[in-house]
């Protein structure tokens, strides 16, 4: 076994690999760019080596720089994580030339299956059903349009060396194909150093289901069930679960056996994933093979008890698999939510800045782990578990140079319904401040009827949120629970205030019991009857809710019991009440005395400033190009400019017809959120 492993990656996946290496007694080496010198993976590793400037193409994906770090530290093996160099055959070849073990598949398997064009040709030769498309290299946008017309719209334009949603566009027209080809090509070159593009038919209403395979260099191969990855945004997975709520055992077995057969056909060893598109009749089509560890691997680990990173390391060390297909058992249900630094209220555009508060929910064990062929531990009977894979910390910076993922929050429970409920509570308990993030959106998905039923496709977000995410409107029953809780909390705060002011006598009488709670356009007149165990909140229609909690003023998380059910609220102070976040809703709650509530209705509403004649930068980013000139008339939907942020190009379009009167920024300019790019007459 190895004594020292270098992790050729950053962020949460580097931290994940370090945890398993430490468990196995193996020393670790981190690499870092200028932007990551204070990163968590650098802190966790036994050693760390500087690798270059912030841009990935000047640091993390420069093979010579990584090889020099290996030589400096004497690492015997390299785990590439995912992204960056994980599917780069030249990197595997460079390691092999110096006698360094690659914790991944052989170079030949990477070349055969890591490249999407080559892998599809091999699958076709092996009589594996594949999605129709053009597998040759595409020279320019004109050729991309011609090919798209021949295949028939809609089509998917994809980077051959791509992954993680980078370099992918859906085209519904010639104009989309032309724009999508160039943007995909640019993103592919920036993210992977390889700008080859191919085009395939976009299958509407598909489910994205993938099979986890594990093979060694002795001819053994197994599959570890499937993962449902249908909830995607911009072709990037957002929510994953294992197993799939759609598959039956026969289909699972057929997909698994086909995936293993494909892996063996190319001499595959290590962990890998075979991705399929599955239609409503459970027909499945090979999509691609990812010759690396997947972002969503934790849900497979949670339902199988297999540490995939450990198995990868053992295979790389030449050990045969200690697990047979008969050893694999799927226990319970696991769900993963990807927490991204992006603002769901601004079209999920990237957000950067400092994490002024970062408090994940407490992690708990999920059950038995299969370690070197032996089961260790027992499954918690009837209990849920929480896992959070992360690479950030409170006070740390979210950089514009890398993928915006902050953490992967996972829950496990004996049943799917219990796993979903555990995830709801975990999301409500996750405190993140200082940047825009998608926690509200994830909470909304967990409560969405289609997700709860398991009836979703890869078009889920586009279909259910066609105009973007605008927050959550809670039903009245939930509003009453929050109103009762806020009334009880406000009473506690008022008692504390009177004590601080020195009015110690009869403070409870001075605080009063009658209050008006206004939230989400509704008002509730309530009476708060308190005792030492909590408070009974009586509404004006006679309904009562019992509230108990140990919340104290200043706490930013309130864990309450409302009529025997748990309620977790994120709490912020505003004038005359609280800012409450719960289940995807962000609500201002005003708690007033009855007379104050009457006067508040007379106050005029403050209107936001008029920005209708301006194009504001929706995210911190770099202007790539400006497509219009001063005096030019633009039409609704016309491209105005392109902004690059976190390795993604975003085309900003006109929302209505107008004439450009002023251009305030040009190519190469770095802009902050809401900086004015263009002005209109």
Image: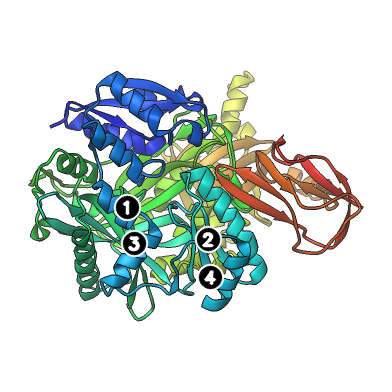
Q: Residues within 10 Å of mark 4 (few under 14, many from 20)?
A: many
Q: Nearer the viewer, mark 4 or mark 1?
A: 1
Using the rendered image of the protein, determine whether residue 195 is visible from the camera's viewpoint.
yes
Helix, strand or loop at label 3? It is helix
Residue 183: x %, y % from top left: 60, 54
Picture quadrant where residue 50 is located = top left
Helix, strand or loop at label 4? It is strand
Instruction: Name the residue beneath numbered marker 2.
Output: 477
Residue 544: x %, y % from top left: 50, 55
Instruction: Name the residue beneath numbered marker 3.
Output: 119
Q: Residues within 10 Å of mark 1 (few under 14, many from 20)?
A: some
Cα distance between the residues tagged 3 and 4: 19 Å
Instruction: Name the residue beneath numbered marker 4.
Output: 155
Cα distance between the residues tagged 1 and 2: 56 Å
Cα distance between the residues tagged 3 and 1: 9 Å
Cα distance between the residues tagged 2 and 3: 52 Å
On residue 111, the disc is: 1
Give the vertical position of 391 relative to 472 (above or below).
Answer: above
Give the vertical position of 591 relative to 499 (above or below).
Answer: below
């Amino acid at each position: 076994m190895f004594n020292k492993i270098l992790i050729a990656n950053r962020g949460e996946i580097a931290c994940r690999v370090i945890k398993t290496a430490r468990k196995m007694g193996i020393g670790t080496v981190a690499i870092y760019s200028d932007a990551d010198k204070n990163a968590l993976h650098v802190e966790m590793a036994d050693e760390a080596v500087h690798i270059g400037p912030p841009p990935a193409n000047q640091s993390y994906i420069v093979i010579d720089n990584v090889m020099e770090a290996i030589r400096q530290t004497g690492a015997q093996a390299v785990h590439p994580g995912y992204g960056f160099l994980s599917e780069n055959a030249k990197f595997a070849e460079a390691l092999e030339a110096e006698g360094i073990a690659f914790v991944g598949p052989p170079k030949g398997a990477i070349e055969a299956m890591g490249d999407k064009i080559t892998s599809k040709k091999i699958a076709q030769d092996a009589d594996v059903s594949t999605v129709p498309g053009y597998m040759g290299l595409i020279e320019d946008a004109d050729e991309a349009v011609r090919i798209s017309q021949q295949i028939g719209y809609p089509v998917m334009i994809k980077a051959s060396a791509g992954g993680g949603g980078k370099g992918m566009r859906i085209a519904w027209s010639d104009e989309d194909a032309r724009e999508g080809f160039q943007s995909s090509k640019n993103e592919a070159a920036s993210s992977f150093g390889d700008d080859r593009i191919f085009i395939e038919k976009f299958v509407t209403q598909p489910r994205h289901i993938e099979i986890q395979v594990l093979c060694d260099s002795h001819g053994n191969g197994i599959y570890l069930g499937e993962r449902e990855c249908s909830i995607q945004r911009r072709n990037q997975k957002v929510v994953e679960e294992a197993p799939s709520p759609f598959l039956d055992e026969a289909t699972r077995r057929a997909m698994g056996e086909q995936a293993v057969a494909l892996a063996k056909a190319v001499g595959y060893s290590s962990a890998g994933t075979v991705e399929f598109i599955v239609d409503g009749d459970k027909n499945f089509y090979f999509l691609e093979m990812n010759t690396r560890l997947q972002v969503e691997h934790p849900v497979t680990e949670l339902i199988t008890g297999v540490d995939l990173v450990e198995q990868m390391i053992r295979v790389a060390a030449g050990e045969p698999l200690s697990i047979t297909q008969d050893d694999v058992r799927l226990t319970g249900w696991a769900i993963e939510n990807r927490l991204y630094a992006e603002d769901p209220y601004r079209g999920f555009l990237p957000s950067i800045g400092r994490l002024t508060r970062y408090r994940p929910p407490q992690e708990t064990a999920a059950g038995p782990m299969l370690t070197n062929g032996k089961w260790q531990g027992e499954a918690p009977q009837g209990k849920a578990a929480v896992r959070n894979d992360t690479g950030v910390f409170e006070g740390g910076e979210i950089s514009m140079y890398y993928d915006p993922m902050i953490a992967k929050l996972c829950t496990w429970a004996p049943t799917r319904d219990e796993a979903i409920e555990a995830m709801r509570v975990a999301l409500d308990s996750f405190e993140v401040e200082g940047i825009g993030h998608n926690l509200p959106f994830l909470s909304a998905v967990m409560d969405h009827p289609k997700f709860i039923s398991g009836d979703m496709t890869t078009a889920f977000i586009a279909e259910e949120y066609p105009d973007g995410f605008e927050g959550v409107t809670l039903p009245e029953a939930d509003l009453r629970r929050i109103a009762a809780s806020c009334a009880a909390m406000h009473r506690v705060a008022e008692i504390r205030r009177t004590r601080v002011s020195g009015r110690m006598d009869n403070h409870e009488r001075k605080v009063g019991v009658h209050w008006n709670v206004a939230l989400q356009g509704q008002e509730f007149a309530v009476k708060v009857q308190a005792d030492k165990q909590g408070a009974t909140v009586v509404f004006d229609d006679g309904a009562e809710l019992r509230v108990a909690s140990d919340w104290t003023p200043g706490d930013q998380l309130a864990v309450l019991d409302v009529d025997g059910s748990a309620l977790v609220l994120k709490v912020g102070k505003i004038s005359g009440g609280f800012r409450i976040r719960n289940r995807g809703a962000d609500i201002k709650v005003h708690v007033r005395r009855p007379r104050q509530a009457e006067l508040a209705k007379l106050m005029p509403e403050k209107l936001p400033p008029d920005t209708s004649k301006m194009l504001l930068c929706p995210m911190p980013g770099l202007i790539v190009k400006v497509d219009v000139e001063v005096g030019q008339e633009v039409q609704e939907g016309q491209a105005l400019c392109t902004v690059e942020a976190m390795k993604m190009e975003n085309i900003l379009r006109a929302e209505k017809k107008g004439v450009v009167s002023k251009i305030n920024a040009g190519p190469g300019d770095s802009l902050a959120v809401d900086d004015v790019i263009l002005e209109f007459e």
